[in-house]
Every structure is written in C-alpha cells, then in structure tokens.
Image: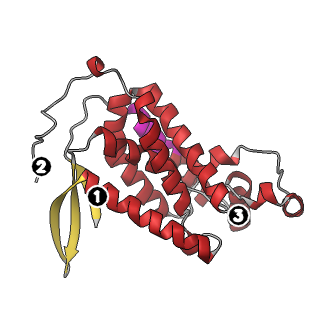
Amino acid sequence: MIPIKDVIPRRETPFVNYLLIAINVFVFLIEVSLPRHMLEWVFYVFGLVPARYTHPAWAYIMGLHFDNYWPFFTNMFLHASWFHLLVNMWALWIFGDNVEDRMGHFRYLIFYLLCGIAASITHFVFNLNSTVPAVGASGAIAGVMGAYIILFPHSRIITLIPLFFIPYFIEIPAVIFLGFWFLSQLIAGTFSIFAGQQAGGVAWWAHIGGFVFGMATHAFFKKKQQDYRVYYPDEVYFRFL
C-alpha cells in the first residue's frame, strides 16, 4: 500500500514542514557528495550509536565521545539512501501540513523536534548494545502521525494498491491506515528484541516511541479551539477521487 494523500485541505502554508523537508534534502545532498569513508564517519559521529554511551571503552577505540549527546538530535536529519529519504519526506508531506495547521508554525517545530528526541531515547533504551548508527527522520515523523490519528480521526488516506500491475486507488480511514502501520511496527519491534541489533536494518522502536509520544503530547501543542475554524463537520469530508 502506498499512501498518496489525505482528504483534508490545509488552511495555511506549512512553512515549517517545507523547511524541515528542505533541511533533510540539503543534508542528504551533502552526504552523497562525501567519499564513503567520510560518510561512514558522519554516521558514527552524528548518528545515534547506543553502544557509544553504554560501552565507553568501545567508544574510545572508535574515537567517539561518550559524553556528547547531540546525536540524539542530529540523527533525525541524516538518511542512509535516496529511498530512505523519499519515504520519510513523502510521509511528512502527507501528514505534517495538517498537524502544523492545528499547532501553528513554532509549536509544530518544537513538537517535531521533541518527537525525534523521544524516538531516539526509545531506540536507545531498546538497543543498548547496538553498534549500528541509527539515522533518519522517521521517528519524528512517526510522532507527527501519532498526533494526526488523534487530531483527524475521521480523515481518510487515498492509497494506491497495485493489483497485477493495475493501479487501484482506495480511501482508507486514517485510524485504520495509521493503526495498522503502528501495529506492524510494534510486532516488528517486539521481534527485534529477540533477533538482536536492528533487525532488518530498521529502528522499529524509534517509530514506536515517536508515535506514542506524538499521541500523548499533541494536546500541549495544538491551538485553542477558537484559533482555527473547521472546514467541514467532523463526520463529512469531500472525496477527492
């Protein structure tokens, strides 16, 4: 299933969402310009490597400072591949603009960054001995998705399902689409505990932590009810397809 868009129009230009996407793309362009050995160094220094803090001797050998906690923040602006970047930025494009509408620009920025940090902490707790750098904005974006499922429970996601090479579009309720996504992360994350390291190369628990944090804290960041108007009654949205 490939999400194409949601059915809720935005009210304001999502400047912060655009800025976050631009920063991630800019950083990735710098990444691809680096030689392989330099890029690996960037991932270890600015990516989140849990063993850096739980195994100081190993960190010393690797030339990493175990008292530097910036990676809990900087890792969310790094990506491992074009596909990794595209998937994350597409999800941010779909869900971020509406959440920014409900929160306002500055509060949305703070919310996004805190979701990313919460995702990093969750990943750290569940992968204490991992020597694999965790990079990517997916934890922060999961927080945005967690806020979205609460703020727009009646929204629908226009989804592409290719059937025998024939594109088939359907509208899936956001609570089902995002609920299924979260459940898949939870199952995979639970499996990764027994598999060790980052099973499949995905930081499942970062996604879980970001999503739960977004759901739990979104109310502290959203505008007061009178600060925004509702386009349509909660029960009705126009269909776009």
Residue 24, given in percent of the width and then of the height, sits at 52, 48
Residue 88, given in percent of the width and then of the height, sits at 44, 55
**In the image, which residues are magenta?**
14-23
| Secondary structure category for the residue under label 3 | helix
Question: Who's the residue at 50% across and 49% down the image?
Answer: 210
Q: In the figure, is residue 25 to the left or right of 184?
A: right
CA gap between label 3 and label 2 equals: 44 Å
Q: Which tag, 1 or 2, sits closer to the chain's start?
A: 1
Q: Which residue is mark 2?
A: 240
Residue 25 is at least partly visible in this image: no
Q: Which tag, 3 or 2, sits closer to the chain's start?
A: 3
Q: In the figure, is residue 4 to the left or right of 144?
A: left
Callout 1–callout 3 Cβ contact below 8 Å: no
Residue kind at label 2, given as amino acid type: Phe
Which numbered disc, 1 or 2, marks the residue closer to the eye? 1
Q: Which residue is mark 1?
A: 177
Q: Which residue is mark 3?
A: 40
CA gap between label 1 and label 3 equals: 35 Å
Disc 3 crowd rating (10 Å Cα; few below 14, some 14-19, many 20+) is some
| Secondary structure category for the residue under label 1 | helix
Q: What kind of colouring is applied to the model shown?
A: secondary structure
